[in-house]
Image (cartoon, grey):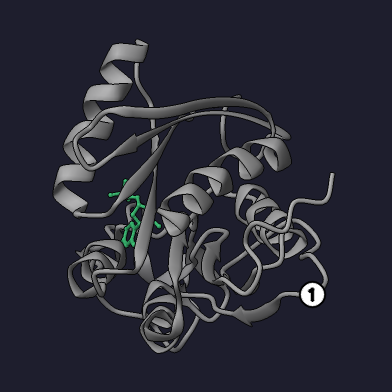
Amino acid sequence: ESRRDLDGVRLLITAGGTREPLDPVRFIGNRSSGRQGAALAQAAASRGAHVTLIAAHVEVTLPEGVAVVSVETTAQLAEAVEQHAPESDAIIMAAAVADYRPAAVSNAKIKKETVGDTLTLELVKNPDILAGVAARAAANQIVVGFAAETAETDEALLELGRAKIARKGCDFLVVNRVGWNEGFATQRNAVTVLDRAGSIVIEAQGSKLSVADEILSVLAERLLA
Ligand code: C5P
């Protein structure tokens, strides 16, 4: 298959999980493998897009033919997005970004000998990068967010998604259910894409590469509209 429907489209994609340091040897992280974001980058590049991939911690090999910017923390990811967003036709925020970071980072390793039996961490909220990008987006830029949620039912999942897209103000939201054995760190994925109105645009399931291609077709259609 050799679709070139994203020829020349400038695409910014974030992938992987951010890591928020506690001290020089420890961090607060998450189970994102970066696989869905890397698959989006690979599929987009093969459809002709110029892809910049902002990669937080990933556990997969990143595709050839995309410009990679490596970051670790949410602050670094925010800075890289801010720098590259203005020159992008579309922005896909697939990274799992830490909602909170430690209030203080210790320059010395935290030692149990000095801390004692309980250690209390104070965390402060990170800025919402997606909401910021969506608020500043030009009329012709498309912004896509992701929502990884634990939900009991499909209906509950969609309700969380609808509330989230309203909060974030992005054009599309890719909702996927995550759990101990679902979504994160797996080969396959099942997603529902919502538009601003909260309506279902597509439902896609399969390998993360095939899901990526279906998400990109939604983008391609909007870009051509
Ligand atoms: O609010 P929640 O973390 O569920 O939102 C997920 C979406 O928002 C993802 O697209 C993620 O990349 C983005 N996000 C962000 N900045 C944050 C938290 C999440 O851009 N601080």
| Percent of width and height locating residue 46 | 77, 60
Task: Tell me: 181 left or right of 168.
Answer: right
Task: Tell me: 200 left or right of 196.
Answer: right
In the rendered image of this protein, does residue 14 appear above or below residue 158? below
The image quarter containing residue 166 is top left
- Quadrant where the N terminus lies? top right
Number of numbered discs overlaid on the protein picture: 1
In the rendered image of this protein, does residue 72 appear above or below residue 205? below
* Residue 223 shows up from this direction: yes
| Ligand 1 image-quadrant field | bottom left
In the rendered image of this protein, does residue 120 appear above or below residue 54? above
Residue carrying label 1: 65
The image quarter containing residue 68 is bottom right
* Residue 52 shows up from this direction: no
Viewer-nearest residue: 58 or 110: 58
- Say which residue appears at 27% left-offset and 28% top-offset: 199
Viewer-nearest residue: 125 or 78: 78
| Percent of width and height locating residue 34 | 63, 54
Q: Name the kind of residue labelled 1 in the image.
A: Gly
Task: Tell me: 109 left or right of 99.
Answer: right
| Percent of width and height locating residue 209 | 72, 42
| Percent of width and height locating residue 9 | 56, 71
- Say which residue appears at 47% left-offset and 56% top-offset: 224
- Say which residue appears at 53% left-offset and 65% top-offset: 13
